[in-house]
Each structure stands twice: as structure tokens, then as C-alpha cells.
Image (spheres, coloured by chain):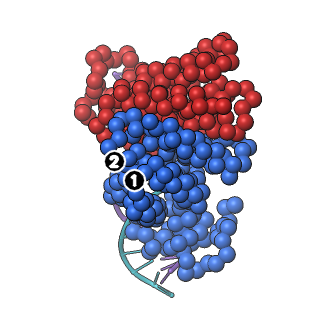
Chain colours: A red, B blue, C purple, D cyan
Amino acid sequence: MTQPDAGGGARRGDTRARALAVALRMFAERGYANTSLREIADRLGVTKAALYFHYRSKDDLLAAILREYVDDLGDLLDDAAHRPASPATCEWLLCELAQQRGRWGSDLLRLIRQNYAEISRLPVVADMRQAHRRLLLALSGPGADLAGRVRAQAALVALEGPVLLPGDDDDEQATRAAALAVALEIVRARP
Amino acid sequence: MTQPDAGGGARRGDTRARALAVALRMFAERGYANTSLREIADRLGVTKAALYFHYRSKDDLLAAILREYVDDLGDLLDDAAHRPASPATCEWLLCELAQQRGRWGSDLLRLIRQNYAEISRLPVVADMRQAHRRLLLALSGPGADLAGRVRAQAALVALEGPVLLPGDDDDEQATRAAALAVALEIVRARP
DNA sequence: GTCTATAGTCGGATAGAC
DNA sequence: GTCTATCCGACTATAGAC
């Protein structure tokens, strides 16, 4: 479990990409501030100095992870913008979002939630906030009132809530499906 | 803003209690790992060593904050246990919870969310998890299936979601009320 | 209860060889 | 691209005077 090259096959030459995956997991599990670059390097099977060749600083490593996230989410939002602003598009967006988050896994969401104090000091946080605003706008519609915006926000957190606080022994796929069903319910109940 | 005795009146003799309030705010705003005891002591107008007289360690200070939370939540859950297990009780519990969280303020919820990696290493986390299980059980009913448990979880996060991610310029009272309305909707939609 | 002073540790980051 | 070696700062926690 603590051996170098955990879970992978290829070595050498892909340190930069592997570092992203390892850091994502460790930041999510142990927290950004509690994860030292030495620990990440150890799990990668390299030294700290090698890490610094690929990333200018620890913050830079975290920012690179978040860049991938905002870019992926941005693509989805662009797709949504090309569709008519309708309840159907809203529901389609929720479904796509659920799928995308299934692909990302829970680590990324936990990373964001549990390290927001550190993230909020990075420049990339501006893009994250904008993506979040676009998401809420697409879910609640253009001229939504407070109740509508709260409803959209509730649908969003309902989607990720069960994933972040895993209910012990439940099947993850089934849990995600149930969460999506509740999220759809919330936006459908909109007057 | 950085002066000693911020926001208070009395000094000397209430350092222990004031430390709790100051630490809560700073841990929530800057993160547990990024807040040093020197900074907390500075804002209190005392030295680090004085803090160590009242609390054995930094972890002990964090644990003391969380103890207050779990005790308060436990009292509410005890009240709920004395009522019949019915939809009405479930809705009553949600309303009480919303009120209680209004009293606590958003700092405590943000503290828990943003520092869960550190909290999960504390002994008090066992009580927090148990309180959470009791809460979900009270909201979803005794023999609830997966969909029911996910629905209860969604109602919970819907209640706190808008508070944690403040929507810029909205009135906080109105936002809380709207969140409670959505949470009630979610549990009412239960078949 | 609060202070000064310090021990002891660890982390991020850099220099320069290979 | 990766290494060894090292610097420097910041932190928790303690000792002991007042």
C-alpha cells in the first residue's frame, strides 16, 4: 500500500501525470496541509527534488489538479449553453453532471470540500467560482428568484452529498443513481 | 480587525471561553492546519503559553469546539426520540435543526466541512458520526431503504448547502428560510 | 494565569552533480 | 529527469520565573 508505483504499471517518463493522480488521492484523504511533498514523492518512487522539476511549488501541484476539473466542467457547460434554456436541458445537465462526477470519482469532490481554505488563496479559484455560477444559472434559469437559486443549489449538493458522506455498506452505483433521482425531483418540483 | 480582544468587552478570566470562539472563527476561515496557536493567542491578547494552560494541545482546542456541537445536537436528538416516529416529527426535527444551525452560525459547519481530515483523527469523531447516524435515522424512519436514506441525506445537505456557499448578496435569513422549505419538500415527497 | 525563552521537529524550496 | 545535500523558516510544546 505504501510501496512506490502503487497501482500502476509504467514508470519513468510519466512522473508528471502520475504525480497528479497520487497527489489528488493523498490531498483528498489526508488534507492538503497534512500531506508533505516528501510523502507524495515517496509514493511515486522519486525524490522531492524530482517533483520540483515538474511543478514549481506545492500550490502549483494543487492548482494543476483543479485546472483539469474546471476545464472538464467548462466543456460540459459549453455544451449546455448550445441547448435551449428549458427544463429538459436542466435535467439533461444534471444527468451529465452525475456521469462526469462518476468518472472523476469522489476524491476530487472531497479534495475541494476539505481544502477550500487553501484553494481559495489560489488564482484558479476565480475560474472555479465562475464555473459554479454558470452551473447554478443553467440549473435555475436566467431570471430565477432566491427560491429558485436555492433550489438549484440544493439539487447540486443533493447530487454530491451521498458520495461525500458514504453510507457505510451501500453500493456506490446505486447510491449515485438514487442521488440523481432526488436531484431531478428537486428541480422538477420547481413551480 | 487584528487587534486583541476583537469584538468583545470583558477581558481576563474568560480566556478559556474566548479562545473557543476565536479559534472557531479562525479555523473556519483559514483552516485548522493554517492557523497557528501564535495567531490565535495574538488575537486574544495573550501568549501561546497562556493558551497551553487552558488547553493541553492544539487538537484539544479543536476537540473542545466539536464537543459543544455534538452535545447540543445530542440534546435535540434526545428530544426527537421522545416523540412518535412520524412524518410530523421528521418535519419538526428539520425545523429545529434549521433554528439550531442559525444560532450556531455558518462558521461551525464550515469548520467541520473544511477540516474533516484533521477532525477524523480525533476521538470525538466517533460521537460526531453517531450523532449523524441518529439524525439520518430520525429523518428517514426506522426501516428505510437506500432511496429513503439518500433522500434524508439530501434534505440534510440541502439545509446547509446554501449557507456554506453563500450566494453573494442574498439576505441570510431569507436564504435559510428558502433552504428549509426545500428540505421539507424533499422529505415530504417521500412515498 | 500569564509571561519569556527555548527545545526539538518538520516542511517547502534551492543548488549543483550526474 | 533525477539525484544528494542543505538552508531557512515556522510550528508545537515545554520549562521555569513571576
Query: In the image as oriented, which residue stretches furthest toward the top?
Result: A82
Looking at the image, can residue A85 be seen?
Answer: yes
Instruction: Choose between B43 and B98: the one closer to the eye.
Output: B98
Contact between marks 1 and 2 (CB within 8 A): the answer is: yes
The disc at residue B180 is: none
SS label for mark 1: loop
Q: Is residue B146 above or below residue B20?
A: above
Instruction: Point out residue B85 in the picture as x, y percentages from the top left corner.
Output: 39, 53
Q: What residue is disc 2 on? A: B142
Instruction: Point out residue A95 in the picture as x, y percentages from the top left corner.
Output: 51, 21
Report whether A43 appears left or right of B174.
Answer: left
The disc at residue B85 is: 1
Report whether A10 appears left or right of A184.
Answer: left
Query: What is the spatial separation of the Cα atoms under label 1 and label 2, in whole angstroms?
Result: 8 Å
Q: Quadrant of residue A162?
A: top left
Instruction: Point out residue B98 in the picture as x, y percentages from the top left corner.
Output: 56, 53
Q: What residue appears at the point 59 percent right and 69 percent down from the top-left corner?
A: B44
